[in-house]
Amino acid sequence: MFEAPMRRRPLLALLGAACLPGALHAQGGAWPEKPVRLIVPFPPGGGTDALARILATGLSRLWGQPLVVDNRAGAQGNIGTQMAIKSPPDGYTLVFAHQGVMTVNPHLYAQIGFDPLKDMQPVSLGTVQPFLLVAHPSVPASNLAELTALAKREPGKLTFASSASGPQMAGELYKATAGVSMLHVAYKGAGPAVVDVLGGTVNLMVANPTSVAPHIKSGKLKGIVVFGNERIDILPEVPTAAEAGFPELGRNPEWYGFGVPTGTPAAVVQKLNHDIGSVLNSDEAQKAIRGLGLIPSPSTPEAFAQRLRSDYEVWGRVVKISGAKAEGS
């Protein structure tokens, strides 16, 4: 009478094994068997590229296969993201998921070529970081209160740069919250935007810490405020939005994450999540990433999916309030 349970045990063990990374050996070999491509939808030189290359170093070492960083810039990240998301769901193309592209662009553009909530399987968050508002030294304001007063005295005179839709909407949220008028100037990458704010062509810039922290430290730019509720290690002297009396500006920071096209085998997603977490939690990566002003924040696929959906709704409301639309959309 014990024969049936005994016969079920090998079957149950087999089913359990199929859920483990060892299941990746099925279909003819262990994954990855060849180089893996990580498509970054922005040009080299910014925070996205820096994080991608730190991750590539760690994963290439772990896998014994190269993780190749492929920068495909254009349309505020839409072009590269569409290319990644529409790739075959075989685990050999990873999506560098940028907060602005995934949660702002769908509301800013009439068409972006993909649905971030349906076409991408979230794998893990990578980092979370606040935006920074910086100013050229010629701007007669050293903190957010002074800047707000200046903008109210001279409506529409101040200009602010951004290199993606995420920082653009952070600037628009500040404008709406403070009741000020400033002119937005869009750039195709952080590099050109930083050059123009350093030269005084534009007065202000909203950016992630990686792009502007060295210039704040050298005195070439002024750090006005961290759009977050905690100061950051790399710039401890720059006050937070909460300290400046605008706590709502720090509730939805920028994030970078990683995904794969929907339909990628679950075992590959599981292994990717485990390996990305291992690299991001390593002492070497932690030091390098925090040195950029970013906060390593690996997560479960479920937690990343929840963050994606929540921010999609929040930034959709901000875009609607701002009335902003992408050029040509």
Image: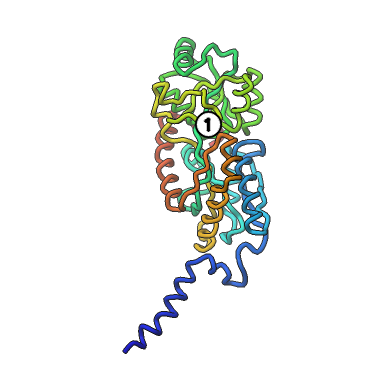
**Identity, as a three-letter code, of the amino acid under mark 1:** Asp
Closest to the observer: 182 or 290? 290
State which quarter of the image contains the N terminus: bottom left
**Mark 1, residue position:** 233
Vertical relation: 268 (above or below) 7: above
Q: Name the image quarter holding residue 229.
A: top left
How is the model colour-coded? rainbow
Place of residue 164 in the rendered image (x, y in percent of width and height, measured from the top left): 56, 34
Closest to the observer: 303 or 265? 303
How crowded pointer 1 is (Cα within 10 Å; few <14, some 14-19, many 20+) is rated as some
Q: For this view, does 329 lie left or right of residue 252?
A: right
Q: For this view, does 294 lie left or right of residue 310?
A: right
Place of residue 35 in the rendered image (x, y in percent of width and height, measured from the top left): 67, 58
Place of residue 317 in the rendered image (x, y in percent of width and height, measured from the top left): 40, 35
Identity of the residue drawn at 49% across and 52% down = 122
Closest to the observer: 211 or 231? 231
Point out the residue furthest to the front here: 283
Place of residue 210 in the rendered image (x, y in percent of width and height, measured from the top left): 59, 33
Vertical relation: 132 (above or below) 113: above
Point out the residue furthest to the left here: 1
Identity of the residue drawn at 56% across and 67% down = 24
Identity of the residue drawn at 59% across and 72% down = 27
